[in-house]
Amino acid sequence: MPSTDAVLVLAARSRDGGLSRSSAELLTAARRVAAPVAVLPEPVDDRICGELGRYGAERVLSICAPELDAVVGAACHLRPPLVLLPATTAASREIAGRLAVRLEAGIVTDVVGIDRGPEGISVLQETCGGRVRVASTIVKTPAILTIRPGAVVAEPEAGSCRSPAVEDLCVTPASAVRAPRLVRRVPVHPLDGRLLTEADVVVAGGRGVGSAEGFALLAEVARALGGCLGATHTAGELGWAPDHARISLPGNQIRPRLYLAVGVSGSLRHRAAIRGARTVVAVDRDRNAPILREADLAVVGDLHAVLPALLAELRRRDRARSTSTEPSEPSEPSEPAEA
Ligand SMILES: Cc1cc2nc3c(=O)[nH]c(=O)nc-3n(C[C@H](O)[C@H](O)[C@H](O)COP(=O)(O)OP(=O)(O)OC[C@H]3O[C@@H](n4cnc5c(N)ncnc54)[C@H](O)[C@@H]3O)c2cc1C
């Protein structure tokens, strides 16, 4: 049955089995324009169903199939005017493109805002490192939108204790109308199973780190903080960090609670890609490095002295925690520090 007033949202679980942050953001964005219907490419349990309802999903389509087949199957079943997908990973962006071909739909990528106005649904995109905003109106449906992670603040629906209706659907490859041919798939190694764009802690290095060995030390710091390793474009191009660790405006924009930048000067594009970070700590020997102006805590010093000291302190605290019943309090950063 076609639904003229529904937005289909591709939802996913977080690592702990709940609703992923980007799915909560997508549902929040979808609610601004129509009733969200979530498609989950796996079985639905009470926990995920409850969280989907809390963020406004009116229906949940459970389709045990690969994400692309699931979303194509759901779109063919529902025929919604809009489909919202996360612009979180290269894989999700690939799904958006392939879905647009299969549905013969229009596509707007990397959307940072969505609203319903007198002329219909309007969307916002950013260009020139976020300095220019482009507003477009959707004139042809169906339309696929990919939403930039962190662009919409995830908010549960006010007063909702909705229990969405769950439908189990089967899709066969027959639902895959006119599949574009997949020429080559390059495997991407997940960062310890986590996504850079979803990480709460990101520890990133730039050219200043100086070598692959320096990045190995940085990876240990990331591990000690329970975070993911990131890198500037240049550090990636130098082969010191894997491609998928690159923090970039068109690719991995991050929004961790803590961003630790080491030997990163803070180019305009890099700063735009970390704009969603809540707390920025930067280590650089040049007190005029632009990243230090962005930082909540700026450490002016040689990273080759700061990193080993930081790692030793993190390990000391870890040991103290595991031998004590009293958890130790992290000290509050206040003044920019000289190392
Ligand atoms: C079209 C275009 C798009 C781009 N998009 C992106 C993007 O999306 N994301 C991105 O990251 N980059 C992007 N770049 C590249 C970007 O402009 C920078 O060139 C790149 O980020 C390099 O930055 P860096 O911090 O690695 O190195 P540098 O700019 O060389 O900075 C290194 C820093 O390390 C410090 N340092 C050196 N040695 C030490 C030490 N021993 N201890 C402490 N500090 C030290 C230096 O003082 C310096 O501040 C783009 C470039 C172009 C042209």
Image (cartoon, rainbow, N blue to C red):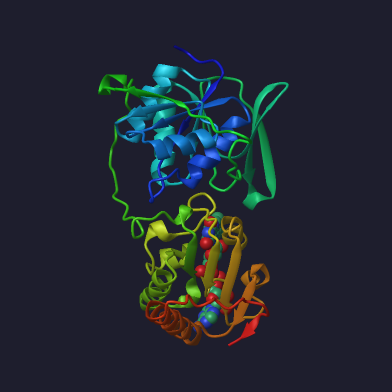
Please give the name of the residue rendered at 49% of the width and 87% of the height, measured from the top-left corner.
Answer: 305
Please give the name of the residue rendered at 58% of the width and 71% of the height, measured from the top-left corner.
Answer: 281
Please give the name of the residue rendered at 37% of the width and 62% of the height, measured from the top-left corner.
Answer: 242
Position in image of residue 322 (x %, y %): 38, 77
Position in image of residue 272 (x %, y %): 61, 56
Farthest-out residue, front: 325
The foreground one among 291 and 330 is: 330
Please give the name of the residue rendered at 66% of the width and 67% of the height, measured from the top-left corner.
Answer: 294
Disc count in the image? Answer: 0
The foreground one among 60 and 140 is: 60
On-image quarter of the N terminus: top left
Q: In the drawing, does residue 167 fall left or right of residue 30?
A: left
On-image quarter of the C terminus: bottom right
Residue 230, visible in the rendered structure: yes
Residue 266, visible in the rendered structure: no
Position in image of residue 303 (x %, y %): 50, 82
Farthest-out residue, right: 118
Farthest-out residue, top: 1
The foreground one among 317 and 112 is: 317
Using the image, determine if residue 291 lies above or below residue 58.
below
Position in image of residue 97 (x %, y %): 43, 33
Using the image, determine if residue 15 lies above or below residue 292.
above
Q: Quarter containing ligand 1?
A: bottom right
The foreground one among 115 and 323 is: 323
